[in-house]
Amino acid sequence: MSTLAPQQPAASAGPAPAIAPVLRVMTAGSVDDGKSTLIGKLLHDLDRIDDDVLEDLRRASQRRGRGELDLSLFTDGLSDEREQGITIDVAYRYFAFGGRSFILADSPGHVEYTRNMICAASQSDVALILVDARTGPLEQTRRHALLASLLGVRQRVYLVNKMDLVDFDQARFTEARETIEAIEAGIRAQPDAPVSQVHVLPICALDGDHLARRGERMPWYHGPLLADLLLTLPGRNESDSEGALRFPVQGLIRPTGRAAGDRWHDFRGLSGRIESGRIAVGDRVTVAEPTVEGEARVATVTDILLHEDARLQASAGESITLVLDTDLDIGRGAVLIHADQPAVLSDRIEVDLCWMDERPGRIGQRVLVKQGTRTLMARIEQLHSSLDVNSGQHAPIDSPAQALRKNAVVRAQLRTERPILIDSYTLLPRTGSLILLEPGEFSTLAAGIIRG
């Protein structure tokens, strides 16, 4: 069950444990809610913007008549973004503080760029959803919250911004908070909705109130600062490590010629990234594929290598090389799983698709499905329902020809040329997601999550 965090005293600003994982954070919300300003001011107050970058921002601010320093320009890297004052593409920033590293994605707020927001959400642990205190949550706020939940972003932090424009009125914040609670209640009511944690903070991004320091103009707020939350919220890799083993093979490592030398002459390793679960030397693994009677595709892990260093075990998020005691004759696209935890495979897949292409999709359309490191042909077999982003409910499709339009979310059935993993996105998000590509062009048509 998703819960709103109670108002508690601010957490200690002391350093996080050294083992704290990288946290992937994204912004979301409507146009002009202050997403870019939030990021610029937060990093400025944490002293994470280099002096030469600050000087460049000052010059850019003055050229555009925006005062001495407009920190929103920090993430608006495209020339069109700086000239129009909007975010178009997803801008990524990398920084660290308090013993933890962060990857922060500033995604656009306009409905036309919802697909960009989805790309950011698919890789994020935390969503910072901004709300204008003057208007409260809008339709785009609801859309982004729902899509973030749909894509498994279980940590959602609502930031009621521009409190200075409502005279720091606690009643206006309470009103916005109640609307947010109603939005979250609707999300929790969805079937298979993941357990989530939600926080609501009143802020003034322009001045930095409640970002990295407490805002004296809102003495009625006693909750955590945004910087405190970022040091304590869990990342996906922590929960991914508790799931079933999924190791998509990226490639075969087999040195040849003089480069192999005596040490690596007979070496054969399988390289890839552990998407979920854990693996240890001595584990018995098999290939996730339809079983053939009489064929045992099982091997034992003899070595785990990170570069040339030997490891006894590894977990989700780590890129490693596995050495097996048996040649399984596999390559890129295969997925290794624990032999005692069989996986479900099928050539018919129920998915929720967010259509990204300008051209509408259609029933019967041939597509490429990419799941992890594997790509295979498929076709869109059925369209079941479309998602209303305001209510969160699926409705029957009246006009299939127009259902798969840009930014629409549709529940569909795909038929693949060969069986693939059927992992529920709720349980195994890394392998429970896929993308559809246009054959020949390899342009992205849609992002999809598997309904388990």
Image (cartoon, helix red, strand yellow):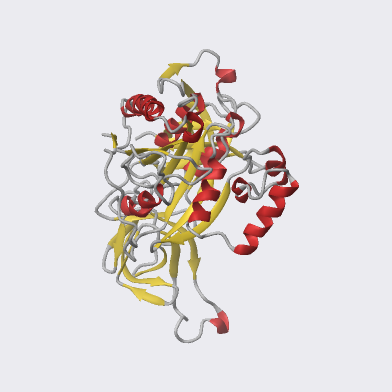
In screen coordinates, is 61 left or right of 34?
A: right
In screen coordinates, is 70 left or right of 169?
A: right
Q: Does 118 appear above or below 385?
A: below
Q: Compare residues 368 and 195 and report the one nearer the observer.
A: 195
Kindly give the residue lying farthest to the top in the view shown. 398
Residue 265 location (% of width, % of height) = 47, 81
Q: Is residue 130 visible?
A: yes
Q: Does 254 appear above or below 93?
A: below
Total numbered circles: 0
Q: Is residue 369 visible?
A: no
Q: Residue at x 30, y 59 (%)?
A: 278
Residue 294 location (% of width, % of height) = 30, 53
Q: Compare residues 277 and 9 and report the one nearer the observer.
A: 9
Q: Residue at x 65, y 30 (%)?
A: 358
Tell me which corner region of the image, top left, top right, bottom left or bottom right, holds residue 377. Answer: top right
Q: Residue at x 44, y 65 (%)?
A: 270
Q: Compare residues 72 and 415 and report the one nearer the observer.
A: 72
Q: Residue at x 39, y 61 (%)?
A: 98
Residue 114 location (% of width, % of height) = 56, 33
